[in-house]
Amino acid sequence: MSNNQSDPSSTRVSFSPSDTAMLEALVPGYTFISRFVFSYLHIDLAAYLQYFVALALFGASMRYLFEHVSDNFSKYFISTAEMRLDDEIFNYFMYWWSRQPQVKRTHRFLAGVRTNGYWSDEDDSDHERSDSEDEWEDADGSMSTESFDAYWTRVINRDKYKRLRFTPSQGRHYFWYQGRLLMLDRQYEKTTARWVLNNEKLYLSCWGRDPSILHQLLSDAQHKFVERDGSRTIIYRGQRCSSGTTFSWSRCMSRPPRPLDTVILDDAQKHSFLADIETYLEKGTAKWYAAHGIPYRRGYLLSGPPGTGKSSLCFAVAGKLGLKIYLLNLSSRALDEDNLYSLFSELPRRCILLVEDVDTSDITHTRGTSIFPKSARTNADAFPPQAGNGSSPAEVDKANVPEKPEREGITLSSLLNVLDGVAASEGRILVMTTNHPEKLDDALLRAGRVDMHIEFRRAVSEDIEKLYRSIYSVSKDDRTHPSSRRGENGSTTTMQNGSADHPNNPKGVEGEDEENTDNKPNGLRGRQNELRSRIATLAKEFASLVPSGEFSPAEIQGYLLKHKTHPERAIKEVAEWVKEEKEKKGAQKAADNKAKEDADSKHT
Ligand SMILES: Nc1ncnc2c1ncn2[C@@H]1O[C@H](COP(=O)(O)OP(=O)(O)OP(=O)(O)O)[C@@H](O)[C@H]1O
């Protein structure tokens, strides 16, 4: 740069072309701006260049200094907890936050109808709201006399308005907790992955190097969140993390526990399944396994036609024992061996890992003769021991396993390793369900991976009777059963279009005190017994009309639900239903056979 003028304000400073090019590179548009300023304001920017440079340098060094000082200050004088979106603690905190009074006062917030934009966890408070408002009781505990129309208008109007949720907006928020000033910083990270909606983090900070107040707050948030769940069964799903590359368990829903006696199955099978799990979870069992050098794991296979109660049993047992369910979909193409390992390693010590319809993942298919002959085994608890050829079962299994994956995703080899390999996780309960046990590879089913097999059946007469009773019986606590409401004049009423043929109306005693009526011949208990015996008689009649072993419990339940307030009509119309269903099944079978024949003839 050359400056041949002594008075910068009066004369133009000239630059060599290389100087101008350099300035243009540093400050794009410099030439244009300087010409513009010179022609309109008669100020030559070049004359002030040294001041601008000095100012820029000063600004940059001040910024650097500030960042350096603030980094060090944060490092030494501020404690911070980081929470990631794909960790459950994020949910704990957001739930806690949404219940704090400061939320109402904050002027920068994210408004939405979900607690956050990523999880699909249902909003339990909406469930609570809907459960309490859907009650068929009035506030004083008496049966509601509200008509269906009035009830439905109220519910529909309420459901139009999703509950508004307010969470802290991006950036910093200051709030008080137990007399201490804390700071929350919500940050979004940019991601290019299509499947990641947002990748956010929360930073919770307090002054000082002692983070105990943060621990306390987070533990408080966890307690509140867990208390809200009560006895509900929590279900997690293995899915891609917010980072988009790894998998982790995300809470996807919670459900009220299903009573075990609502699952209709051979009692011996049901109780041996439950007893086996209880023994496995018993105090001292883990030590016993360790002392005997046996990996502490247990696996179950539930097999049977669709709709026979496999998932229901698993769900009911989880509810009874308060276990969480972890759902794994083996068919996911994005799931690779590393992800599978990390999912298994993240499993808590006591939980049910549920792999539904394990036969639908082609990696589990048999590569040779299956241990299941064409007709599936019946109620076998244990599986045949492996051939004693001197090789360990694992070695025998691996010998047959193809090394190269033929598809994206996991291979059978990696699945076998996570289930039962050296690095496999301990303490979990594996439950696999299938409609086709004969399709599964023997290696997957050997003892150690599957320790008990329960075969579900289509409903036999005894099951059909139980299903009928379970639909029409009203338990002592079941005050919400729509069929048990009583009209204003004391007559039995049903849902809006129902008839009065429901025999089960133990609550037809509005105004009567249960205590006082119990001992009277016509008291509540007397009438309940009478109704129960009537239902039992009808159940027998119903069971005699439905062919044993032909329909799944789900099919029968579906039919009964169509007549849920008309037990007698269910009996009257069942013969017609059976006929129609048989015809439908016959037509379906004929179509399947034809499709198979066509496919065979194309091959040959
Ligand atoms: N044994 C049973 N006892 C009580 N209810 C049953 C039974 N079997 C099926 N149901 C009812 O049928 C529906 C489907 O049951 P479920 O999902 O447990 O069947 P599944 O055997 O797991 O079916 P799939 O093989 O198709 O997954 C549920 O509503 C459940 O209540």
Image (cartoon, rainbow, N blue to C red):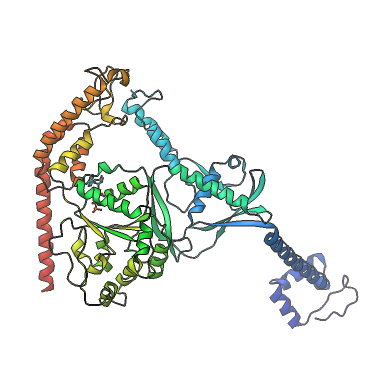
Question: Camera-side residue: 90 or 332?
Answer: 90
Q: Which residue lies most toward the right here? A: 6
Q: Is residue 426 visible?
A: yes
Residue shown at 87%/72% (left/top)?
Answer: 8
337 to 496, vertically: above or below: below
Question: Camera-side residue: 170 or 347?
Answer: 347
Question: Camera-side residue: 18 or 470?
Answer: 470
Residue 10 spot, x, y in % from top left: 88, 71
Residue shown at 55%/50% (left/top)?
Answer: 218
Q: Is residue 573 visible?
A: no
Residue shown at 30%/42% (left/top)?
Answer: 259
Q: Quadrant of the C terminus?
A: bottom left
Residue 126 spot, x, y in % from top left: 43, 40
Residue 352 spot, x, y in % from top left: 35, 55
- In-image side of 265 versus 206 (left or right): left
How many marks the image carries: the answer is 0
42 to 226, vertically: above or below: below
Q: Quadrant of the N terminus?
A: bottom right
Residue shown at 64%/46% (left/top)?
Answer: 175
Q: Quadrant of residue 540?
A: top left
